[in-house]
Structures are given as structure tokens and as C-alpha cells.
Amino acid sequence: MSSEIKLTITGLVYNQTVIGTYGLVLSEEYGNRRFSVMIGEPEAQSIALKMNNKKSPRPLTHDLIKSILKSFDAELVKVLIYDMINDVFYSELHIMSADKVLIVDARTSDAVALAVRTDCPIFIKSDILDIVGTEVEVTAKEVMPGVPENTEDLTDMDLDLLTVESLNEMLDVAVNNEKYELAVRLRDALKRKSR
């Protein structure tokens, strides 16, 4: 039987090959293996908002699910990525209700978005990580998420998903390369983050 390995979210990276998708980068908590899950823009935005401590003016779907769990006195205790078929990850929510654990199937993107809202741990079966995990050397300065190459193609929503560090790095590059229109958009994205 496969053991479970705890994961941490390393970042979100804009996918330049498939428009409207992002790579959710997950790493083993006590190791140096990483892998990426392709997720849609709404889920990426939901995860990024919570990770950047921002609130949507209206509750997003994952906020609603969290509220429903609370209303029924239930708690999300674990997210488990339990399978991968044809490069698609399968996850389940482990929900504690009335001293009983209920297991609910979920898309990995939704499961992670709910996990970040409830401070719930995320796990993966070790045999799945053995297949998809790539060993990386962790550098002193990890940038999350990575700075995309074609920054001119990014929408304001894409820019809002990036961290302050990434935006500042991109702003420096834009100014140095005299791309002032892009620099203005990056400056505006930084202002939105400071609200």
C-alpha cells in the first residue's frame, strides 16, 4: 500500500502554450521533488487571491463551499491526490462530520483552492509522486511564480496572479528594455496588490 507525502504550494505559473491555463506547482514538504498540475484560470485566480491574502468583492465558489462546510459543522481535514490517469490527477476531500470522515471526489484544482482557504494539508500518494515528481535543486532565492517570457501577452488578470516580487522583477526588466507601456501595466498591477 502506498504511503502519503505532504505537499506545499510552490507557485502558479502562467502556461504560455495553452491559453487560459496555469501550472500549479506543488512540492513535497520534506524533500526536493516537484510537479505541476494544469489548472484553469478561475481556479488559479481563486488560489492566488487566498495566497496573496486578497478578498473577492463577492464570495467565490470555494468560499461558498467553505461556508457550507462550516454551516454543517464539518471540517476539511485533508486533501489527497490519489491517482493519475492519462496525465489527469484525481483528488479527494476528506471531510470530518459528526466524528465520521466522509470522502468526496474532487478536481485537484478545486481541492487545492479549498485547502488553502481552510488551512488543510495536501497529500499525494507516494507512488504517484514517484512517477510525476522531478528533483530540483532549491536555490536561495525562489521566485513564485516564475516570470513569464512573453509578458506583453499577459492580461491584467494574469498580472494579478503574480507575486509582488515577480512584478517588481518584471518592472525592472521592462524599464531597462524601454518597454514603458508594459511598465505602466506592471506598476498598476503593483498598486492593485497594495490595496
Image (tube, rainbow, N blue to C red):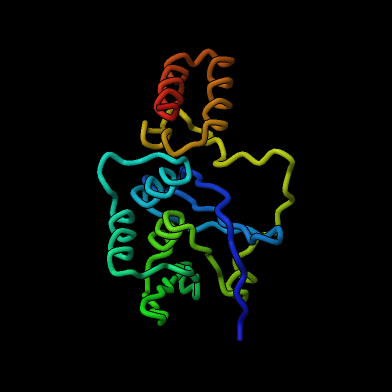
Q: Is residue 79 left or right of residue 34?
A: left
- Count the marks: 0
Q: Nearer the viewer, residue 164 or 50?
A: 50
**At 28% from the left edge and 56% from the top edge, which residue is drawn?**
64
- Asked if 153 appears above or below 2 in the picture, the reply is above
- Asked if 40 appears above or below 191 in the picture, the reply is below
Query: Can you say which quadrant of the picture contains the N terminus?
Result: bottom right
**At 44% from the left edge and 39% from the top edge, which residue is drawn?**
161
Residue at the far left: name it: 58
Image location (x, y in percent) of residue 181:
42, 16
Image location (x, y in percent) of residue 77:
47, 69
Residue 191, quarter of picture:
top left
**At 37% from the left edge and 52% from the top edge, which residue is drawn?**
43
Image location (x, y in percent) of residue 48:
44, 44
Residue 88, quarter of picture:
bottom left
- Asked if 5 appears above or below 170 in the picture, the reply is below
- Asked if 1 appears above or below 4 in the picture, the reply is below
Q: Is residue 58 left or right of residue 35?
A: left
Residue at the far bottom: name it: 1
**At 44% from the left edge and 70% from the top edge, which residue is drawn?**
91
Query: Can you say which quadrant of the picture contains the C terminus?
Result: top left
Image location (x, y in percent) of residue 5:
62, 70
